[in-house]
């Protein structure tokens, strides 16, 4: 933490940059809320603890609106749970980033969604994805899929201005991780409780630097086969990775403060999650 005067100065600078960013790239239109069937929702992250943490959910699964993210649509659980909301955030999902292998995986995901979605599904993208042909084809080729678009404009700075901007959906805390966007969209939809499962966020213990000084990470997801890991190179320095993690976890703190201000509880069902911003609960 910085001394208060210095922190205020940095927050003020962040505010100036955020205002410029907002005026430059924000669409000043509110995103439609989730089509709610309950007062509570469950955001299903893709961490390896998804199944075990879902067992801690109070009551029956049918009592919750289910929210899926990222590549869950390629798993058996997608058809089993039939989430009513699906959220994507990374530019790779509208082919604006990522390797050719990643883009092939995204196209495979979209094929799965078109073929296997037999229930009503709201699919949320940042508005920058709106004109992408492959994305428009999702609802053109499957009548159950309805596309929605949201502002993921990063807005930081002084608290007295951040929350009014968030409430108007002109910006949100830094959505470096899809969970940030999913939680903010759930908050916008005014659930009383938002539960979070499979949010291990334990990347720190899976990082290492190899003999060629390349930063590597070994990830596991709930759909990863037992005993296997997704080992990949991260093309940045380790200090840059830890700086990114700082922003990821700080975003959760900002989201929790905003949710509390609206009278919404966010509860993390993942017992060993590295996220310390939300209350954890036991069964």
Image (spheres, rainbow, N blue to C red):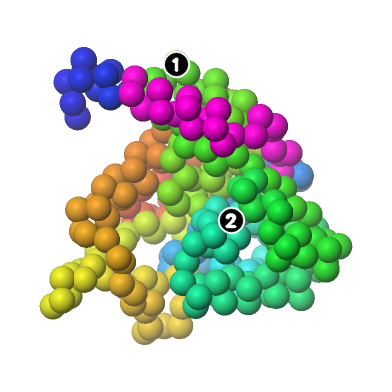
| Position of 83 relative to 250 (above/below) | below
- What residue is disc 1 on? 160
Q: Quadrant of residue 25?
A: top right
Side of 73 where 153 appears, left or right: left
Is 124 one of the magenta-colored residues?
A: no
Structural crowding at the residue carrying mark 1, measured as other residues with C-alpha within 10 Å and reported as few (<14), some (14–19) or many (≥20): few
Residue 147 can be seen, yes or no = yes
**What is the number of the mark on residue 22?**
none
Task: Give the magenta part as a residue range.
Answer: 12-34
**Residue 80: percent from left, percent from top:** 68, 71
Residue at disc 2, secondary structure: loop
- Quadrant position of the N terminus in the picture: top left
Would residue 212 appear left or right of 117 to someone viewing this image?
left
Residue drawn at point x = 38 percent, y = 36 percent: 253
| Spot occupied by residue 146 in the image (x, y as percentages of width and height) | 78, 54
Q: Is residue 223 left or right of residue 116?
A: left
Which residue extends farthest right? 143
Q: Disc 1 and disc 2: Cα gap in Å?
A: 29 Å
**Residue 121 placed where, x, y %?**
75, 57
């Amino acid at each position: 933490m910085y001394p208060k005067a210095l922190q205020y100065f940095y927050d003020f600078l962040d505010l100036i940059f955020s205002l410029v960013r907002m005026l430059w790239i924000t669409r000043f239109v509110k995103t439609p809320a989730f089509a709610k069937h309950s007062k509570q929702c469950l955001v299903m992250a893709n961490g390896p603890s998804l199944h075990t943490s879902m067992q801690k959910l109070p009551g029956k699964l049918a009592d919750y609106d289910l929210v899926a993210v990222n590549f869950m649509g390629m798993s058996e659980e997608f058809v089993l749970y039939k989430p009513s909301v699906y959220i994507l955030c990374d530019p790779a999902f509208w082919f604006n980033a990522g390797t050719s292998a990643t883009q092939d995986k995204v196209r495979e995901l979209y094929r799965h969604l078109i073929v296997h979605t037999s229930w009503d599904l709201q699919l949320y993208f940042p508005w920058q994805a709106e004109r992408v042909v492959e994305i428009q084809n999702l609802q053109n080729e499957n009548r159950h899929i309805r596309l929605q678009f949201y502002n993921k404009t990063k807005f930081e700075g002084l608290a007295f201005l951040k929350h009014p901007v968030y409430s108007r959906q002109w910006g949100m805390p830094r959505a470096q991780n899809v969970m940030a966007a999913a939680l903010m969209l759930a908050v916008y939809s005014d659930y009383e409780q938002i539960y979070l499962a499979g949010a291990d966020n334990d990347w720190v213990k899976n990082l290492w630097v190899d003999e060629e000084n390349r930063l590597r990470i070994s990830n596991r997801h709930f759909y990863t086969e037992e005993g296997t890991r997704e080992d990949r190179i991260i093309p940045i320095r380790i200090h840059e990775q830890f700086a990114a993690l700082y922003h990821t976890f700080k975003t959760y703190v900002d989201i929790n403060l905003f949710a509390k201000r609206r009278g919404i509880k966010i509860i993390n069902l993942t017992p060993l999650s590295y996220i310390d911003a939300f209350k954890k609960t036991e069964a």
